[in-house]
Amino acid sequence: MGTMGTQARVVAVIGSPRRGGNTELLVEAAVAELEARGVSCEVVRLAELSVAPCLGHDDCASRQACFQQDDAEDVLAALFAADGLILASPVFFQSVSAQMKALIDRSFFQYCKAVRLRARAVGLVAVGAGSGIEDAFDVLRRFVTLSSDRDIQALTAGGFAGPSGSAAENQELMADARRLGRELAEALV
């Protein structure tokens, strides 16, 4: 399976500030499908880590490492080395969460160093209460495009859900997340 006979590896990054919320429920459903098909998954919850915002020093290209000492470097290293990705965010004010945006901004260091994603396919997950789903998908797609030197298949799952945890009762939304997991596994195995 995967690259050169090894097991494919997916890193799923959850940008929700809330554990057990709608975004996480969708990611868990997708990850279950991936693991059932032999794909190794690592789930990263940004809210449980320290990822400071980019400080915009504009000299990343001349630095050996980002001087901010937090969890961003480890998360980005895992993200850029994975065979596949899931990037998941709730919709906050028509875009991705602050947690996801901070990680995306911090990837500028990799961009300056010409470090590119290895992923062969990505799953994008966005959950909102009223609008902004496509806007959030656009932000995540742009991150993938700018972090790549080739086309990477991008699959999407998401939609609208009410209060935290209510996505579990939305059969259509949960089915969409499971479909994403199956299709991502097919692209990687």
Image (spheres, rainbow, N blue to C red):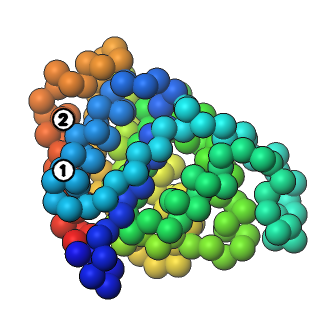
Disc 1: which residue:
33
Q: Is mark 1 on a helix, strand or loop?
A: helix
Instruction: State the quadrant of the C terminus.
Output: bottom left
Q: In this view, does 45 lie above or below 113?
A: above
C-alpha span from label 2 to label 1: 12 Å
- Crowding at label 1, few (<14), some or many (≥20) Cα neighbours within 10 Å? many
Q: Is residue 12 above or below residue 175?
A: below
Q: Earlier in the sequence, mark 2 or mark 1?
A: 1
Can you tell which quarter of the image residue 20 is in? top left
- Give how far across and how far down residue 119 sits, in percent: 42, 69
- Give how far across and how far down residue 148 sits, in percent: 52, 72
* Residue type at numbered disc 2: Met
Q: Which residue is drawn at 35% across and 18% down?
A: 164
Q: Which residue is drawn at 73% across and 70% down?
A: 112
Q: What element carries label 2?
A: helix
- Crowding at label 2, few (<14), some or many (≥20) Cα neighbours within 10 Å? many
- Give how far across and how far down residue 100 sits, in percent: 55, 41
Seen from the viewer's position, the closer of residues 163 and 24 is 24
Disc 2: which residue:
174
* Residue type at numbered disc 1: Glu
**Can you tell which mark lies on residue 121?**
none
Q: Which residue is drawn at 34% across and 54% down?
A: 41
